[in-house]
Image (cartoon, grey):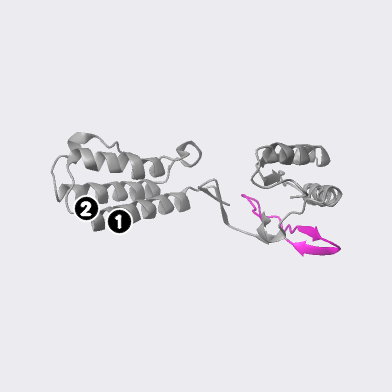
Amino acid sequence: MSGVPQGSIIGPLLFLLCVNDLPDWIRNELKIFADDTKFWSRIKTVADSTILQQGLNSVCCWSDKWQLRFNVKKCKLMHIEHSLPTDYYTMEGTQKVPLKTVQEKTDLGVVTRSDLKPTSQCNKLAAAARRIIAMVRRHFRKLDAEDFLLIYKTYIKPRLEFCIQSWSPYLHKDIETLKKSKEQQQDWYLSYENSVIKSGCGNWN
């Protein structure tokens, strides 16, 4: 990272000093989190697309100046609810490298789709809950209410509610996916004890 020492206490501060002026180089909206950078623009006309490409060019110039290279393979493009035929590229040395268009992207554990629907996130969390339940069933032949709640609140509930403010399900099929996952957890526990309903694990409707 341009000479910033890895694993040191002062390393993060030095890195922030390196990237602190990046927003001054472009006209588009921009957010930086650690070493991840995202910027975007509302595209209504071809001129708006040109401005976004100019922002990419400026970022490449900033990268060359500070010798802080972007990983081109990890640079992705997502079109959100617009149909203009727009393509963008970034520079790798003197070569133009087209940005790969994706329909969904995971950031900080949350899946964002180009249609902004939370379906992929809900499916991901339901699958994760099933994997945890399967693992617990392999290792525990019997659980009482206290043990079940400890596992549920420690390993399952935090996953199902992680950053829910940004992906809260509103489609019926997504709500049903999470409810089905919850019912599978209850059925598993009820095979041992008929008390999980009284324990209060919340619901999704």
Q: Please say if 8 is above or below 78.
A: above
- Quadrant of image for the C terminus: top left
Read off the magenta span: 77-98
Judge left or right: residue 146 versus residue 49. Answer: left
Front residue (pair 105, 46): 105
Where is residue 110 drawn, in percent x and y?
Answer: 51, 46
Count up the numbered dots.
2
Where is residue 116 drawn, in percent x and y?
Answer: 54, 47
Q: Which residue is mark 2?
A: 140
Instruction: Name the residue rendered at 34%, 45% in the picture.
Output: 156
Instruction: Name the residue rendered at 85%, 50% in the picture.
Output: 61
Where is residue 65 drawn, in percent x and y?
Answer: 86, 48
Under mark 1, the amino acid is Met
Where is residue 184 drawn, in percent x and y?
Answer: 25, 51
Residue 65, visible in the rendered structure: yes
Instruction: Name the residue rendered at 69%, 41% in the picture.
Output: 11
Judge left or right: residue 97 versus residue 82. Answer: right
Q: Would residue 82 be counted in the magenta stretch? A: yes
Graded by Cα atoms within 10 Å as few (under 14), some (14 to 19) or many (20 or more), the crowding at tag 1 reads: few
Q: Could you tell me which secondary element the residue under label 1 belongs to?
A: helix
Residue 204, visible in the rendered structure: no
Judge left or right: residue 37 versus residue 180. Answer: right
Q: Could you tell me which secondary element the residue under label 2 belongs to?
A: loop
Q: Residue 196 — which label?
A: none
Under mark 2, the amino acid is Phe
Front residue (pair 44, 32): 32
Question: Rounded to the nearest whole Å, what is the CA distance between mark 1 and mark 2?
Answer: 9 Å
Where, by quadrant of the figure, is residue 91 drawn? bottom right
Q: Which residue is mark 1?
A: 135
